[in-house]
Image (cartoon, grey):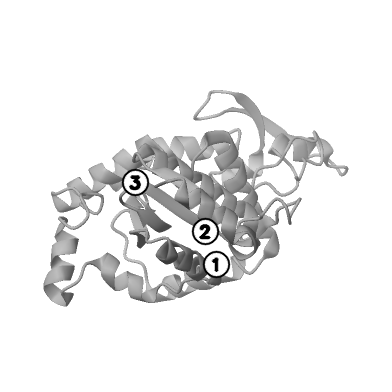
Amino acid sequence: MKECKHCKKELTYKQKVYCSRECQYNDSKGEKVKRIECVCLFCDKKYLETEYRLSINKGKYCSRKCKDNHQKEIYLGSNNPSFGRNISSEELIYRSDFMKNLWKSDDFKNKVKEGYKKFINEKGYYPGQDEKSINKRKETIILKYGVPHNWCGIYGKRDCDLTCIKLYGKTSLEISNNFFRNTQPELLFEDILKNLNFDYSKQLRIHSNSFYKIYDFYLPKYNILIEVDGDYWHGNPTKFKVLNEQQMRIKINDEIKNKLAIEHGHQLIRFWEYDIKNNKNIIEDKLKELK
């Protein structure tokens, strides 16, 4: 965590040394440039600004946050300086190269990851997955195309499903299943299901408003979903006391899958890779209890 050099306040992503121009001004050791008292265009707060910045039409706000919030209000539609502007091929190349170089920086990557973690911990969901954002996407699609997007409709009856069947004779799920490679623990668990004569299906998708999750096995007779968790990737607590970054991301995804299964009225059971390989009898006994 980076702190302001002057007041020790936590810095935001765009702030590098100081949290405000006031802190930068107060912390400067050289001769201080004369400043003029101004009033922020957004919050009406009084602040000090240099005569030079005012002369070049800058320094109209007391902070970057006020500037961003004000522009969100006034730069809408045709009022936006970029509205209807054609972007040259040179600018597109420049933007692409700029972002590629930015993502090469480990410091930038870590800031983005920390931002995601902080957001998820505070809100309890991924950015853009709140009800307001989901409804906004729906309204935008209706406004743009005249009809709501139907990816979230009943699987098999959506327009995209019917088109896929018409073109290829299969649903998208049947096609995509050909590209899934079962892991060794999944293959071992499938053998157990076969030996116990369970009726099951693999790679079941459950859709939410704007995303879907895939579950390893589904027992339709008992309405039970089964996940086979690899010891490393899912961070088996008997082997990993501290989870790394990748394991933490998968843990968050597992919690989302748990919640989604409950919301759709399914029971979800998880089995560890270690137990499937070393405690086959215990796994079989648990499955027999379902019958």
Q: Which residue occupies 81% across, 37% down?
A: 6
- Which badge, 1 or 3, comes first in the chain's sequence? 1
Q: Crowding near pointer 2: few (<14 within 10 Å), some, many (20+)?
A: many
Label 2, label 1: how many angstroms apart (C-alpha)?
Answer: 7 Å
Q: Quadrant of the N terminus?
A: top right
CA neighbours of label 1 inside 10 A, class few (<14), some (14 to 19), many (20+): many
Which label's residue is closer to the chain start, 3 or 2? 3
In this rendering, would 104 be left or right of 6?
left
Dot 3 amino acid type: Asn
Q: Residues within 10 Å of mark 3 (few under 14, many from 20)?
A: few
The relative height of residue 265 versus residue 107 in the rendered view (above or below) is: above
At label 2, the amino acid type is Val
From the image, tell me which residue sits under label 2.
228
Q: Nearer the viewer, residue 65 or 250?
A: 250
Quadrant of residue 213 within the rendered picture: bottom left
For image coordinates 66% across by 54% down, the residue present is 236
Q: Is residue 54 visible?
A: no
Q: Label 1, label 3: how many angstroms apart (C-alpha)?
A: 22 Å
Q: Which residue is mark 3?
A: 223
Name the image quarter holding residue 49. top right
Please report the residue visible at 59 percent of the width from the left and 66 percent of the height from the top: 103
